[in-house]
Amino acid sequence: EKEMFKNEKRIGELDFIIKKLYEDNVMGKLSDSRFIQMSNDYEQEQQTLRNNIINLKNNMIEFDIQKDNSKKFLDVIKKYTNIKELNASILNELIDKIVIHERTFIDGEEHHGCRENRHLMSQQIDIHYNFVGII
């Protein structure tokens, strides 16, 4: 918010400077070529500041959404601090989806039907929790 305020203030200052440049150009205190160069630079700075403000607003919206989702997740998880048994109801409330990836073997080969020939195996499992995604 501070950065946004700073950018908005600078945009206002640049508007004033551009008006002053125009007046100086009209009064003959500033050449046309110098006026064009300076006003283009100031207008480019203003556009950069406007883009920054848009990005900051989007970041603030995203932050608010994440903060709200985290609060919702904490509200749900507080109910289950002393889980004795995991059941379908609890899973449905806490978990959005579970993604199970394909198995990978350390030596790169799977030896079908022969357990003693298998080497270390790995399988990635992603748990997507409601409101917060993968933790």
Image (cartoon, rainbow, N blue to C red):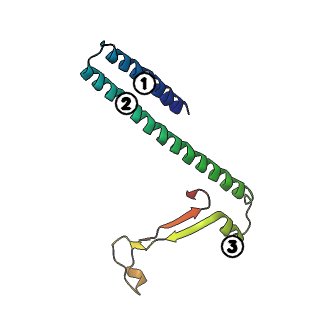
Near mark 1 (Cα within 10 A), the count class, few <14, some 14-19 or many ≥20, is some
Judging by the rendered image, the residue that carries numbered circle 2 is: 43
Residue 34: give x, y in percent of width and height: 26, 20
Label 1, secondary structure: give it: helix
The residue drawn where x is 65% and y is 63% is 94
Residue farthest toward the left in the current orientation of the protein: 33
The residue drawn where x is 60% and y is 46% is 64
Judging by the rendered image, the residue that carries numbered circle 1 is: 14
Label 3, secondary structure: give it: helix
Q: Earlier in the sequence, mark 2 or mark 3?
A: 2
Q: Is residue 27 left or right of residue 53?
A: left
The residue drawn where x is 73% and y is 63% is 83
Residue farthest toward the front in the current orientation of the protein: 26
The residue drawn where x is 40% and y is 35% is 47
Between the C-alphas of marks 2 and 1, the distance is: 8 Å
Residue sitting nearer the eye, 78 or 28: 28
Location of the N terminus by quadrant is top right
Judging by the rendered image, the residue that carries numbered circle 3 is: 88
Position above or below: 95 against 41: below
Residue sitting nearer the eye, 126 or 44: 44
